[in-house]
Image: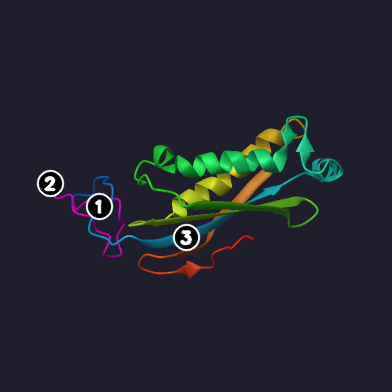
């Protein structure tokens, strides 16, 4: 069976020549600085949003934002344990920006940096979405009508091509 990676063509990179699942071999790539930024939105029913505004984003379980940042950070560092073909990476930096985008919508932005042979898009997406899930968990006693998403990659830098923009939190 041929297990070479197809990362140089336009096909799915996690399939080998026989169409079977395979982790991409990055051993011949040069380690470069890489970064990725992802976001996930959390939409609250009006009454829940009003309560969170009144309480400074605190729920009965505690500080929503601080807990989400901690959970998101832990998730970034464990992405390779959650997603089968992600490489374990040395994470050089993780930053979260969490802010209201409207009266009822919270935006969670996660930026991850590394110097390695593969990018950190999945780590940034995992951080943003797990932080959003944590917000849901912290607030579900108020309502189960909280909606997560969309979750999306805003940008990545390093590797073959740059895409979108990278957040540079202060």
Return the residue at label 3: 35
Residue range highlighted in magenta: 2-17
Q: Is residue 97 above or below residue 47?
A: below
Q: Magenta stretch containing residue 14, yes or no? A: yes
**C-alpha gap between disc 3 and disc 2:** 34 Å
Indicate the position of residue 4 as horizontal and vertical percent values. 18, 54
Q: Quadrant of residue 139?
A: top right
Q: Nearer the viewer, mark 3 or mark 1?
A: 3
Q: Identify which residue is drawn at 47% across, 49% down.
A: 123
**SS at mark 3 in the image:** strand
133 on left or right of 90: right
- Kindly report the secondary structure that dominates the magenta region of the rendered protein: loop
The number of numbered badges drawn on the structure is 3
**C-alpha gap between disc 3 and disc 1:** 20 Å
Q: Is residue 89 visible?
A: yes
Q: Considering only order in the chain, which callout, 2 or 1, is on the residue closer to the N terminus?
A: 2
Residue 1: mark in rendering? 2
42 on left or right of 112: right
């Amino acid at each position: 069976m041929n297990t070479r990676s197809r990362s140089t063509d336009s096909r799915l990179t996690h399939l080998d020549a026989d169409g079977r699942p395979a982790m991409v071999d990055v051993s011949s790539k040069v380690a470069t600085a890489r970064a990725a930024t992802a976001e996930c939105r959390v939409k609250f029913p009006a009454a829940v949003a009003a309560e969170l505004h009144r309480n400074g984003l605190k729920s009965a379980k505690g500080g929503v934002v601080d807990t989400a940042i901690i959970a998101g950070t832990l998730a970034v560092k464990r992405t390779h344990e959650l997603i089968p073909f992600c490489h374990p990476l040395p994470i050089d930096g993780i930053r979260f920006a969490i802010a209201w985008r409207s009266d009822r919508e919270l935006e969670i932005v996660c930026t991850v940096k590394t110097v390695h042979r593969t990018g950190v898009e999945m780590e940034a997406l995992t951080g943003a979405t797990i932080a959003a899930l944590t917000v849901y968990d912290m607030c579900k006693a108020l309502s189960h009508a909280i909606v997560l998403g969309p979750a999306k990659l805003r940008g990545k830098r390093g590797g073959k091509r740059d895409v979108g923009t990278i957040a540079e939190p202060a």
